[in-house]
Image: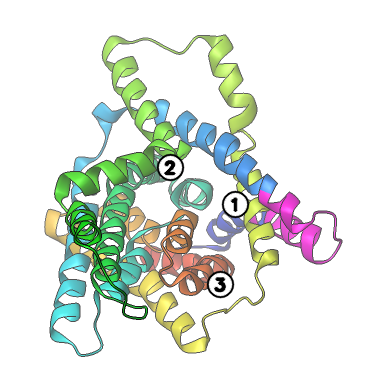
Amino acid sequence: MIGLVDIYKVVEAIVPLYVALILGYGSVRWWRIFTPDQGDAITRFVSYFTLPLFTFEFTAHADPFKWNFWFIAADAISKVVIVAVLALWAKCSTKGSYCWSITSFSLCTLTNSLVVGVPLLKAMYGQLGMDLVIQGSVVQAIVWLTFLLFVLEFRRSRNDIHSLSTPTGPKEEVSKEDLEGMVGVVSSTKPSFWNLLRLVGSKMAVNPNSYASIIGIVWAFASNRCHVQLPSIMDGCILIMSRAGTGTAMFSMGIFMALQEKVMSCGASLTIFGMVLRFIAGPAAMAIGAMAVGLHGDVLRVAIIQAALPQSITSFIYAKEYALHADVLSTAVIFGMLASSPVLIAYYAAMELMH
């Protein structure tokens, strides 16, 4: 049975995260130490330096040959279940839509796994919890964020074709050459698999966290197969920046919160909708996937709890870039971070009581 000591271990891991979050928030909103432009610069510093090196450090030191592939299979099944439900909802319900299906997928599946998940799950379940969260974060970065980019680019391509093929201005004399040129543009923007894949590849190529995950997992395979280690001088260069990863990421999150006009910028009803998807639908789908592959014990508990981690910041960045319900994702990131502490402790207590 869970005791006060167990709860204290979790709180002990959570409090430092919130201290960094509050300092970031206060530095912009209360003390005016940083201007919005300076806040953006700090966020870019975190995005391009400390967080990628933080990601690389955890990924490169993992052992892929000891990964729990049943856990990864359960995660994949949970995502497939969510995609199937959302596709059915979009097709059969009058309230369903392709755009809301994309946003709902982000809310249900994409978590802030490394920054928040690693310290929390390590406090709850030790090395096992940390290892499983790292595995999930690598798969998320390489597979599921790529999938999200793919469907977002597909949606953008469809809109581009519609805007090119639908006249919006006053009637004008159109020459034969202009008409042929428009047809050429429309035909060239038809969404094909390889065109979309190329667009997604270009997006991933400028995302340092993608590099960090891919290079980290390649090195992890090579080092564990050939039994080699990073030179100590190179390891030290990575560690000096990566050790600041969690703190600076949470500080940056606080700045992001301070720069928003409202905590719930999308309204109360959509906020509740987002929280239900994040903290209930996501873990429920993971429970289905876990039962399908027969997970049990602490692996099952970690699988469900890590599915209830706060919303991925990257999902908001993509939503803003593609102009798709950015206010909903912004609220999910902010409010989800604030609400995650009691929710995760409740899940932890429930899992231990079931045990």
Query: Which residue carries the number 2 mark?
Result: 130
Neighbor class of circle 2 (other Cα within 10 Å; few <14, some 14-19, many 20+) is many
The span from disc 1 to disc 3 (Cα, nearest Å) is 19 Å
Q: Nearer the viewer, mark 3 or mark 2?
A: 3
Name the residue nearer the viewer: 308 or 260: 260
Query: Which residue carries the number 1 mark?
Result: 13
Query: Which residue carries the number 3 mark?
Result: 335
Residue flagged by tag 2: what amino acid is it? Met
Name the residue nearer the viewer: 304 or 149: 149
Residue span colored magenta: 17-40
Res. 265 image quadrant: bottom right
Residue 316 drawn at (x, y percent) = 47, 61
Residue 285 vs 127, above or below: the answer is below
Question: Which label belongs to residue 322?
Answer: none
Q: Residue at x 24, y 27 (%)?
A: 65
What is the number of callouts on the image?
A: 3
Question: Which quarter of the rendering shows the N terminus?
Answer: bottom left
Q: Main secondary structure of the magenta part?
A: helix
Q: Earlier in the sequence, mark 1 or mark 3?
A: 1
Residue flagged by tag 1: what amino acid is it? Ala
Q: Earlier in the sequence, mark 3 or mark 2?
A: 2
